[in-house]
Image: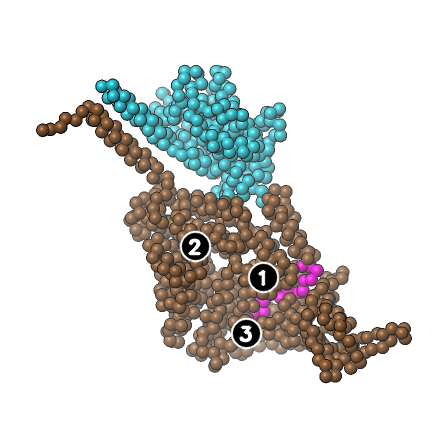
Amino acid sequence: MTKTVSTHEIIKRIIALILVLLICFSSFFLSNAFAVGDGTEGSDGTGSGTSTMTDKQLSSIAMLNYLTVLSQEINASTNSRLYLDNVYSDIVNNINPNAVDEDTMTQIRVLLNTINAYQSIETKRERIQYIYEQNQANAFQRKIPNPMSVLSLVQSKSPIKALVSVIYMAVDSSDSYKSYLSEIESKYIEEGWTLEDSAAQNLHESRSEAFEYMVEMCQKYNLDGMLALNERSVESFVLWENNPNITRRIEFLEKNRNTYQAYGKYWLVLAESYYAKGEYAKCLEAVKTYEDLHINTFRKDHDFAKTLSIALAASSELFTSEEYVSRAEHYLQLLLKNIETDDWALRYLAAQSYLDLYARTNDRNYLQKAYDLAEENINYLIDVQYQKNDEYLSEVQKLVAKRNDSKQRKEEIKTFNKWLEEERKVALPPVYQPLVLNCDLLFGLAEELNISQNNQVKIEEMLHDTNRPLFLIEQLEQRYYFNRQNERDYPDILFDGTVLEIPAVMIEQGATIRVTVTDGDSVITFTDWVLEKVDRGKQSDPQQFTAVFKSKDIKSQKYTDNSIVVVEIVPPEESNYEIVTYTFEVQRGKKLLVFNDTKFVLVK
Amino acid sequence: MKKAVRALTILVLIITIVSTNTLYCFAHPYAFQHNKELEAVLFEEGYSKYQSDTIRNYVTALEYASYLAIDQFGGSGEYQFSFLKTMKMGGLPLRFSTIDYSEDLMGSGKQINANTHRLYTHQGWDREYENASVRKFWDARRNILLGTINTVLGFSRLPGLFGYSDKCNSLAGIIYYVHILGDYIEADTYKKVSILQDLAGHEKTDGNDMISYLSQYVEILFEDQRDSVAYKELVDGLEAIAKDAGTLVNSFGGVNTEEEFEQYHQCAIDLLELLKAQIPTLLKGEDHFRSVFYPNI
């Protein structure tokens, strides 16, 4: 018996069918605007593969992926403004304009302009960068106190592994700025290292626009959507990139290879993670994969250059000397191709690597390469030292806030000006440690190479301009000569029993004072000397600046006619120049025949 | 039977509602596309509106004011209205209902929809309507955009007393026509632009076309930059496009063939590209604009 369907039922079914069709129809439009997917965007997720994409399209997406991750890394950093300052300066002039299309370049500029707006004021950025470099140079010196030590027969391990940790000193960690700080610097250094919430939010929104753009780009050109990251995948990546548990980090990266495999930095982070875990073979595989991606969105690929230092270290662990040499040459070539003039740290590491190759092969060409790199570094670093000297000798250049500056910016300027004022009262002549580090290496290499007289003259002419000293610190200014003529005596110091007046040109930041009072069998050493001020008077000649040191402990010291006072100016721990010693004899007498008068006479 | 009729009526209503919303999707589909075009005309390439909270909020305010003045209808836009109020933008009425375009202004009682919302809002920025209700409505709408621009850029301190300056009105006009151009570009048939003000072709008659007005606004707003390259290129470009578009508008029967519509459509695209190419530089050269949106220069 057939069942008759009522008219009512027919109408209901028609209504339901039409509703379903309309819902499907509307969804088609909605899906074009909103992201769907588990990690990447695209029209259908399968795409036709990268082979149909032009190089520019590939590079454009690669660049946008890089910038969106960078923007998230900024937000995720504990010291987000500090991180932002560093990364912006690294990339702003480094984008290869030929590698991306015009529309993408516009989008890139939007992201970069957003990041730029939140940078610290320029002079403050430069100051913090300087402090980081001082710390970095000191760290190199601590790892390899003698820059030529790799040639020592005792040295059996590659020095590169020790140096890699210095290359990877975090730019946004306070630990990277702690040593080599004056008291004033310590007080101000960590001000304003974090972005305000609103700034972080604006970075986030700017990044969201970039994702929208990538979606449009993938759809417009029918590109493989798997190549473009989205907010979720970027957030995950940065979260895991910063995870201190290396095993878990590797687990995440390996399991999510499909999501990130077209994103270059994924392979670098993977390589770094394998290295940290001691999985050197896998580390090198990851580096090779990155190399094979042929990413050319940067003029110089700094991230890759850094990772190559790890590749060098990993290779030294894995291979015999012979096999290591050919690999090291390849990595060094790539590394040097991807660094700028001011990448002195990586160039220093490269010089040490060539020195290591010389130690393994006795091939003097490697020695020459190391020398050339040290010379190149010095030629750049000299100007930084001169600039620091000029700043030191000039009046304090305070910043002036503009009328339209934000409240935060005005506060930042006010605080920075206070920093400058306070610091000037106790400022000692600057010593640019990266220059000292490279001078020590260069002179060591020069001796090993037994360079010609002409080359010696060339180096001395580079370092010693007739019109002005390179180092304002006497011990350093007199140090870097092959054949020093007319050595001059160090200037005198004054001591009155409790206060030391030392010419500022004799003492750099980080140096310490040691005063030993000997009286018969009694020997007492006083080390609590504190710099109270640097008196410049009305002079602009640094030779006339006087650093005044005081000690609380020495106030109770009693002197006799037999007392001998030895004052030692001890250079900073990582320095290679000598301690300067002054000896004082005590002469006790009467002033106006009544009052005790104790004089401290410098023994020459 | 009664149930069947009721069911069919419901069906027809559902189809009508969903269709009109779907149709709306075919006009410049989302406000953000109008916003993107506006940003591209106001700011140079690569400009980031996220460089400070102030700038981001001002850009948003201009976009919302543009939307409320030109495209709002049917009760939508209360959020945007509240935002402008919160930002203390000038020119806003006390109540949202004053500017809500939900019913036909002629008093027929018909509800305004996506097909009819352009009638009194897309006819020209300085259009003077004869009908008092329409005139009152359009004045209130204009004030939203004028008031917002004036607050953001600080053209005059007491607009309530002295009115909005010519420069303020000119910038508002340019912003208005960027929106209209967006609608032109999105259209795929002449019917969809027939209700919009003509691009050109009236300069010798009543002057009631887009490029005639744009030329006036450019002359007023950038009077101090008449010797600049950007200004000359803009004026020359406007003349060239006006000539092509005007020829089509004044052809026999107007723009009434597919081929003519394609050419006319291209004129709209060219006009928007011209504005994008030259206006940002000229605006950056204006003190009021630069001090707000390029504070570091």
Tags 2 and 1 both on a single chain: yes
Which chain is represented by cyan in the image?
B
Q: Looking at the picture, how far across and down is residue A164, in whole percent?
A: 47, 67
Q: Nearer the viewer, mark 2 or mark 3?
A: 2
Mark 2 chain: A
Q: Earlier in the sequence, mark 2 or mark 3?
A: 3
Q: Quadrant of residue A301?
A: bottom left
Residue A514 appears in the figure: yes
Mark 3 chain: A
The three-letter amino acid code for the residue at tag 1 is: Ile
Which of these two is toward me, A135 or A586? A586
Start and end of the magenta stretch?
A: A423-442
Which residue corresponds to mark 2?
A239
Which residue corresponds to mark 1?
A131
Q: Quadrant of residue A33?
A: top left
The three-letter amino acid code for the residue at tag 3 is: Pro
Majority secondary structure in the magenta region: helix
Q: Is residue A366 left or right of residue B15?
A: right
Secondary structure state at the residue bearing disc 2: helix
Which quadrant does the N terminus of chain B fall into?
Answer: top left
* Residue furthest left in the image: A1
* Residue furthest right in the image: A593
Residue occupying the point 53% across, 49% down:
A116
* Residue furthest front in the image: A1
Which of these two is toward me, B282 or A81? A81
Q: Looking at the picture, how far across and down is residue B234, in whole percent?
A: 50, 34
Mark number, residue A145: 3
